[in-house]
Amino acid sequence: MSSVSAVNTLLNGTTTNTPSINISSILAATSGNASALDVTAAVAAGIYADRAPERVWEADQTTLTSQTTALTAIQTATAAVTSDLQSLNTLTGPLAARTVASSSADVTATAATGTVAGDHVVVVNSLATTGAWYSDLATGPTATLPSSSMTLTTAAGVSKTIAIGSGAAGDTLNDLANTINGDGFGLTASVVSDSTGSRLALIANTSGAAGDFSITSANYTGTSWTSADIPTGDSLGANSFTLASGGTTTTISTTAGETYATLASDINGMNLGVTATAGSDANGTSLSIAGATAFTISEPSFGFTQATAGANASLTVDGVPISSASNTVTGAISGVTLNLLGASAVPVDLAVASDTGQVSTAINQLVTDYNTAIGLVNAQFTVGTSGTEGSLGSDSNVVSLQSTLEQALNYVATPATGTTTTVSTLSDLGITMNPDGTLSVDSTTLSSALTNNAGDVQNFFEGTALNGFANSMNTALNTYTEPATGAFTLDLSGISASNSDLTTEINNFETNYIANQQTVLTAMYSSAEIALQNLPREMQQIQAELGNNANGSSSS
């Protein structure tokens, strides 16, 4: 008979009956003393007896709760195993991870997942550089610049001229920087200041020859010109410039080691109609030229010097010449990104190989999670101190899972026709089963297999078309772990339903029977208590009616 039927039978047979109270028993229990009758305790004792079926159902619920806890733990542990198997059965998982070893710090590299393993040779002739220029020295970022102009020209021949000084867009270094940064010319301008003053620094936004640019400044024409400062104590290098005055153009040369004072003396000795003066200030020494009439000098009043020319990196990869605008080179080796850090004096060897660290971690994680799962399953069939198995010892799904887990480990990989393999079973990877069903990993054997036979390891887990060991075991476990229709899901759903049914039975029993019994028993025991309280007086009345005197004798 089911629990529900039992409850219905009990209710149908008792709810309309009125419990009887044996007054003689009450009197015997209290010896006629009304205060000895504890109505609350008496009712509680009666209700406790009536709740005997509830205690059976509650014990059943405790068992169901224990089963739910144990089964949920097994479900979680088994799902972890399937997750590990899935990561070992994908073209983008640990088995496809690659590392690149380099023989020199001049070149490092990374390889994308699935890159073909192999060795490559790289020779770096020169690194890619980024075009950069800097201006003559100004006293500060906001100092007014002398009137001039600058023309920026890209490697593609696109030019842009910017006016400098005299209230134009480039009145100060800060103004020039803002103008250049806002015109989308592909350059970044910044003002660099130190103890000698400030300069405008320009750098291309992209490296390589295509990002290179040049700056030309307009020659100065006027009656007063001052050169850029050179630091105090420094001398001039070998150079030349032209000065046109009074219809005559003269080339003026400097020699290495010459000073502005010497140059000024040389110019004054040429009788060019101008006066040259060497001066100095906190920023260094300079040359000033003044004339009564306008003259032209092939040196701008505010000029620029090239710091670095933009150039492509030059290298060879496996003997093939490569030119790259960046020192990060892709496409030279399929799936590999080269990072050029220096020109190499000798060829650099790059070895693309399986990432044994990732693979080892993934395999060890699988073993760890398997041991957790099989340990939880085995615990259900272990007889404890109480002489009983775990709460799921008779659960057919758990019994089946134990067998499935152990049988899945017997997988043997079959190599493709015409090929051989060094890894066909788990034992070839150093994975063996212990007497208790858990697994152990021989790290030396595993490391050797990963280092020397990475392809065979990958084939063991993935097969020829993701149909190897990982897929085989995952398919077997999916019967239990599938979220919608898996055995664990259905089992837990059934346990939950049974638990819910018992809760309903208990609630109905409390409402339909216990509540009524509480009322009836309370009323009856209360009546008995009143009767006991009246009993002494009634006994006196009876004795009086029978003629008993105080001495207990009757009158004649």
Image (cartoon, rainbow, N blue to C red):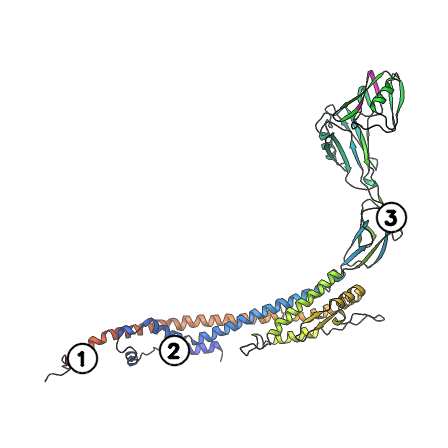
Q: Is residue 153 visible?
A: no
Disc 1 target residue: 542
| Residue denoted by label 2 | 14
Amino acid carrying label 2: it is: Thr
Residue 64 in picture, x, y percent from top left: 53, 72
Up/down of 322 relative to 86, above or below: above
Disc 3 secondary structure class: loop
Camera-side residue: 366 or 465? 366
Question: Mark 1 or mark 2, which is nearer to you?
Answer: 1
Residue 386 at what x, y percent from top left? 53, 77
Measuring 11% from the left and 83% from the top, which residue is drawn there? 555
Q: State the separation of the CA atoms marked 3 and 1.
A: 132 Å
Depth check, front residue: 112 or 99: 99
Q: Is residue 320 above or below residue 522?
A: above
Mark closest to the chain's N terminus, 1 or 2: 2
Which residue is drawn at the image coordinates 37% and 74% (left, top)? Answer: 45
Q: Relative to 408, does residue 199 appear above or below in the rendering?
A: above
- Quarter occupied by the C terminus: bottom left
